[in-house]
Image (cartoon, grey):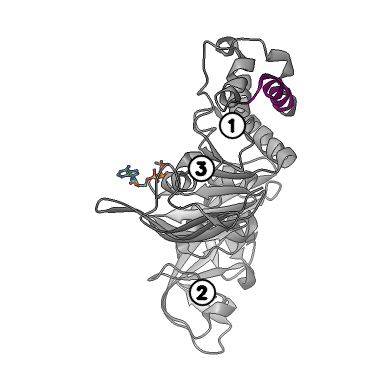
Amino acid sequence: MAQIIIKNVRKEFGDFTAVKESSFTIEDGEFFMLLGPSGCGKTTTLRMIAGLELPTSGEIYLDGEEISQKPPSQRDIAFVFQMFALYPHMNVRKNLSYPLVSQGMDRAAVKAKVAEVAQILGIEDILNKPVGGLSGGDRQRVALGRAIVRDPKAFMMDEPLGALDAEFRERMAEELRALHDRMNATTVYVTHDQLEAMQMGDKIVVMNNAVVEQFGTPQEVYDKPATLFVADFIGSPSMNFLRFDGVVEEGATDIKMGEQVVGMPRQMEGARGSLVYGIRPEHIKLTDTGAYRGSVLATEYLGTTQIVTLDTANGEVKARIDSAQPAKVGEAVGLSFDAATVTMFDETTGQALK
Ligand code: ATP
């Protein structure tokens, strides 16, 4: 059982700041994702929770106790480095027993614990096999088992599925999530893959340039992105951004977007300056009529839906529509969207308008 609180944590390496003042809470039993592009500071954050790096300032609490400056051995947190890091010359049972034997646990207790973990992971039938000859999936299960046997308070995983091909990766992701749901152990998981974070996470922290951009459920970061960065990073194809420069009249209901008049979201009233009008592809409908017009540049068939790329007065816009609806390259169409589905951003600060 473990709740982890990160409070104003900062990490400097010499002159370089890898993580700027970050705060968020990981609740007991959550599958928690640290998401962001390469170099944004997610691994450093994970390593600080595990004690492999110490914060320059700020505090980390594990179940109410401050652990910020404690060594890893005093934190009771398991770091699953890489799922393939096993002892190749030992069989599965020895690989699983080793962490317990080295802790001084007696033989009967080790045997019982290994049996319990093997059952959780469904690997009882391969306990006596050497790990060298195992399939990739079984090696991953054994590597996880090595972390689980110690009954840690929480698991830290750094891109554990990163090296796998797409199909296998998806299967292991499902298995990992199912395992988590059975064990309910707090898990912090680093990934740069937004889809993986959305599919697996209870909560997501989105980081960019050493800063926490947003912290929330997958639905919150998707539907209510706090910043332009989050809006762009989450979702595929990503949100459409239409630029607007000018002053919005008080009480206006429509605005002129380039040549076109479009509905105005509530947050824009009275706004001035450089604004960005953000709209997800699935919120755009294509119609025969409609004041806002574009021409079809390309279509991409995705089964039940298709992505239609349109050339508009505001540049390229992507719409996700039903595959059954005809859309021909070169055709002129109307675009319609409900102003309530639009998120507005201040282009200067990158923040969403509330
Ligand atoms: P990636 O997915 O590429 O690992 P990340 O988001 O996990 O990215 P970090 O590994 O946390 O990023 O690194 C953040 C920044 O801190 C990077 O620019 C990295 O070069 C730098 N950094 C990390 N560890 C050290 C270190 N020990 N000394 C100096 N700089 C470091």
Percent x, y for residue 279? Answer: 56, 63
* Residue at (50% x, 49% y) in the render: 35
In the image, what residue type sits under mark 3?
Answer: Gln
In the image, what residue type sits under mark 1?
Answer: Ala
- Front residue of this view, candidates 263 and 137: 137
Residue 115 lies within the magenta run? yes
Percent x, y for residue 300? Answer: 57, 43
For residue 56, what is the image quadrant? bottom left
- Where, quadrant-wise, is the C terminus in this rendering? bottom right
> Closer to us: mark 3 or mark 2?
3
Using the image, tell me which numbered label, if any, was put on residue 353.
2
Using the image, tell me which numbered label, if any, was put on residue 74.
3
Residue of label 1 = 147
Q: Which one is earlier in the sequence, the residue at label 3 or at label 1?
A: 3
Mark 3 touches mark 2? (CB < 8 Å): no
112 with respect to 39 (left or right): right
Percent x, y for residue 46? Answer: 48, 46
Residue segment shown in magenta = 105-117
* Residue at (58% x, 71% y) in the render: 291
* Residue at (64% x, 57% y) in the render: 219
